[in-house]
């Protein structure tokens, strides 16, 4: 495929709910090994559930990556249930359609998501996890200054148990910036 153009990133809106459902279920079907969820569980979510995921709040945002108006990628920020203070975000559910990978769009999406978190009045830090062996995601997040915390044995969408590597990012430390060089694309 040629270098993608007309690329835009923006928080999804309730009117994007149907497209988000389609993309997320594609992610769980094609890349089940990357996500700690299950196709069967998410397939049962209601229209209202998908609309909630597309409603930006202080502690929730689903960023959509669009090519010529088509939703081709996604990434979510939501509260980490293990932190009762509500000050820790989970950075999760990143997915880019296979034919759009390898062009730096994952990095651009990550940079935009970090920017959103830094502006959030709610979150002081963020956590993320990556399944053992996911080289693209590991390269992407390590380069962004994510600090390794621990391995955990986890259940994954492909029905297997495998180690997930957990990372943490202190959001209010300006020296850990998503490098401007991530902006290989002029995202609008
Ligand atoms: C992870 C994902 C979002 C990355 O998106 P992308 O647009 O392909 O990523 P980029 O082009 O920005 O590349 C990011 C880094 O990963 C590296 N990379 C990309 N594909 C790679 C691969 N298959 N193997 C090893 N490294 C890879 C790139 O070289 C780049 O690092 P560099 O700048 O040091 O060279 C995408 O691969 C994807 O959707 N994967 C399936 C779902 C998934 O794994 N989600 C993450 C769950 S934690």
Image (tube, grey):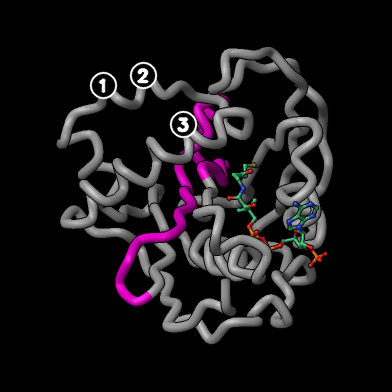
Instruction: Give the extent of the magenta segment.
Output: 68-93
The correct choice, above or below, for 74 with respect to 109 in the image is above
The disc label shown at residue 29, or none: 3
The quarter of the picture where the N terminus appears is bottom right
Q: Secondary structure at mark 2?
A: helix
91 sits left or right of 179 in the view: left
Q: Residue at x 47, y 32 (%)?
A: 28
x and y percentages locating residue 3 in the rendered image: 58, 79
Q: Secondary structure at mark 1?
A: loop
Residue 92 or residue 5, whichever sits in front: 5
Q: Nearer the viewer, mark 1 or mark 3?
A: 3
Q: Is residue 130 magenta?
A: no
Q: Is residue 91 magenta?
A: yes
Q: Are marks 3 and 2 in contact (CB under 8 Å)?
A: no
* Image-quarter location of ligand 1: bottom right
The correct choice, above or below, for 32 with respect to 167 in the image is above
Q: Which residue is mark 2?
A: 41
Q: Does label 3 or label 2 sit earlier along the sequence?
A: 3
x and y percentages locating residue 43 in the rendered image: 30, 25
Residue 168 found in image quarter: top right
x and y percentages locating residue 137 in the rendered image: 71, 49
- Give the CA distance from mark 3 to mark 2: 12 Å
The correct choice, above or below, for 95 with respect to 79 in the image is below
Q: Does label 1 or label 3 sit earlier along the sequence?
A: 3
The correct choice, above or below, for 179 with respect to 102 in the image is below
Q: Which residue is mark 1?
A: 44
Residue 13 or residue 104, whichever sits in front: 104
Q: Are marks 2 and 1 in contact (CB under 8 Å)?
A: yes
Q: Residue at x 54, y 43 (%)?
A: 92
x and y percentages locating residue 85 in the rendered image: 51, 34
């Amino acid at each position: 495929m040629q270098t993608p153009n007309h690329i835009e990133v923006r928080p999804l809106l309730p009117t994007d709910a149907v497209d988000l459902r389609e993309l997320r279920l594609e992610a769980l079907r094609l890349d089940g090994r990357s996500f700690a969820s299950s196709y069967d569980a998410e397939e049962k979510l209601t229209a209202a559930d998908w609309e909630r995921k597309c409603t930006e709040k202080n502690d929730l945002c689903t960023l959509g990556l669009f090519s010529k108006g088509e939703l081709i990628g996604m990434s979510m920020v939501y509260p980490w249930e293990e932190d009762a203070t509500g000050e820790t975000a989970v950075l999760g559910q990143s997915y880019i359609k296979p034919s759009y990978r390898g062009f730096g769009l994952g990095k651009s999406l990550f940079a935009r998501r970090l920017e959103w978190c830094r502006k959030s009045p709610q979150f002081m830090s963020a956590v993320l996890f990556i399944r053992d062996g996911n080289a693209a995601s590991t390269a992407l997040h390590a380069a962004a200054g994510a600090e390794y915390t621990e391995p955990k044995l986890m259940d994954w969408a492909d029905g297997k148990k495998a180690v997930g590597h957990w990372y943490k990012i202190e959001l209010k430390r300006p020296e850990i910036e998503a490098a401007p060089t991530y902006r290989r694309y002029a995202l609008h």
